[in-house]
Amino acid sequence: MANDAYSKLMDLYSEYSIMGQVDMVIGWDQNTYMPPGAAEMRGVQSSIIGAMRHRAITSRKVKDLLKEASREKELTEVQRSSLRWLRREHERKSAVPEKLVMEMARLEPVSIQAWIKARRENDFRQFLPILEKVFELRSKMAEHLGFAKTPYDALLEDFEPGMASGRADTILKGLRARLVPMVKRIVEEGGPVDDGPIRKGYSEKKQYEFGKQVLLDMGFDFNRGRMDTSAHPFTSGTYDDVRLTTRFDRKDLRPALFAFIHEGGHALYEQGLAKEFYGTPLGEAVSYGVHESQSRLWENQVGRSLPFWKHYAPFLRRTYPNMKSVRLEHLYRAFNMVRPSLIRVEADELTYNLHIMVRFEIEKGAMEGKVDLKDLPEVWDDCYERYLGITPPSVSQGCLQDIHWSMGLIGYFPTYSLGNLYAAQLMEAARRDLRDLDGSIEKGRFGTLLSWLRGNVHSKGRLYMAEDLMKRVTGKPLGEEAFISYMRTKFSDVYGLAL
Ligand code: CO
């Protein structure tokens, strides 16, 4: 009887999930090939799909079936987990009134436009009223969703299910305490690193060919995905239709290549989800942090490693004759240069997390009423001074640089740093489980690493919560130790310091 309720629920969820996939395809199109004049029309299309999905998951029918299914005692692990996610989705979506959902949806395009203009004109004041509105609506949403300690938790839950901000706070503060002195030492004693050799001239065509080869070597299946360009690289789609994008800088090798690898990591996760979970609550990535761990693992732990470049340096020199005389060591150091900088998306692997902490502290403070958004530029600059030792010369290069808050994405930033930590801990476990991982990377063979990730992370989908998954795979809960030890080893090597 109740199992009948379960299968009915799965049918309903499958419609909800597949409508989401349709929404992803039109979202991808919006950011790649859609003519600009179609923006308004696309907005209407998306909001209709959004409303349909909202109605589907919050329906009376789903509510009744959930009640019925909960009486069943003999459920398998997969069924229990599926029901847990479905119930969570139903309850969270039902908690927020449709009126508020629509108000937020209407504000978003206006707010993004206002942010673009304010950033261009380097004028925070004109953006402030809209920013305050965004935070006000998110606060209302948090009130509806409910929370134990801080309204921020209600928002973080959307991106990192199961992680209370107190826990994220402890981990990230621990990380900051270790990183700030490390960056300081590198800046003061590390000596210069020359990235000249990777800032020459490179045709887009050659950059594309090089990146595509790396992506193929990583195991990306072009029969079930495609690669395009966009202003900001991203990955969209899932299972047999995964779309990723990159962007080219003709004077710098890094943006395109590392976007290929980073987005490739996201894409491999989506292509590696278990077939039997397709269209069910388990057929999705477990959290934004774990998703980001996959991109960071490939981009940094693999793509910026010495074994990786031992394999690709000859290929690089063949592709770009102007790099013929660049030595491997030089290349490795150039790809791992540490320098406190103003812009998050251009930051190196080490200082990147400090950029995240600034945002995390501020958005959490604003949600708790401890930071007045009117003071945002000063609060921002003060954090940059304390953590990175630099002061933004303008709000465009300071608190207006990211699109996230204008889109209402509050609680998203910490997942970037959590992703780095998950990645380091996973890579440590992979090194424990796999013999001579560096040896295979050096030969350009990534199959063993990919199979390990497939078996331990990708194919699990949302069977376990992120923290639980981490404990099962790595033997311990998430912490900063693995990342710190990885940073210490790598940058001691790059800078010849005992960090
Ligand atoms: Co990413």
Image (tube, rainbow, N blue to C red):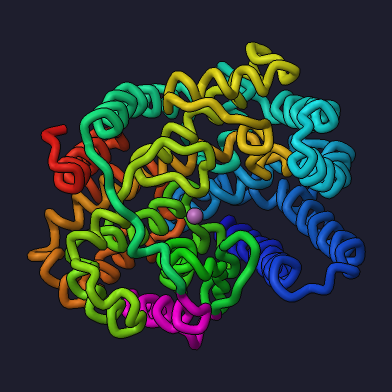
Using the image, determine if residue 429 lies above or below residue 369: below
Residue 403, quarter of picture: top right
Q: Given the current orientation, which residue lies at the most extreme bottom position?
A: 223
Residue 163: within the magenta?
A: no
Look at the image and tell me whether residue 118 can be seen: yes
Q: Is residue 33 left or right of 111 when viewed as pictured?
A: left
Query: How many marks overall?
Result: 0
Residue beneath the point at 16% across and 41% down: 492
State the image coordinates of residue 414 (x, y, percent, origin top left): 49, 36
State the image coordinates of residue 31 (x, y, percent, origin top left): 71, 66
Q: Is residue 45 left or right of 261 when viewed as pictured?
A: right
Quarter placement of the C terminus: top left
State the image coordinates of residue 217 (x, y, percent, origin top left): 32, 79
Using the image, determine if residue 133 lies above or below residue 225: above
Residue 221: within the magenta?
A: yes
Look at the image and tell me whether residue 144 can be seen: no
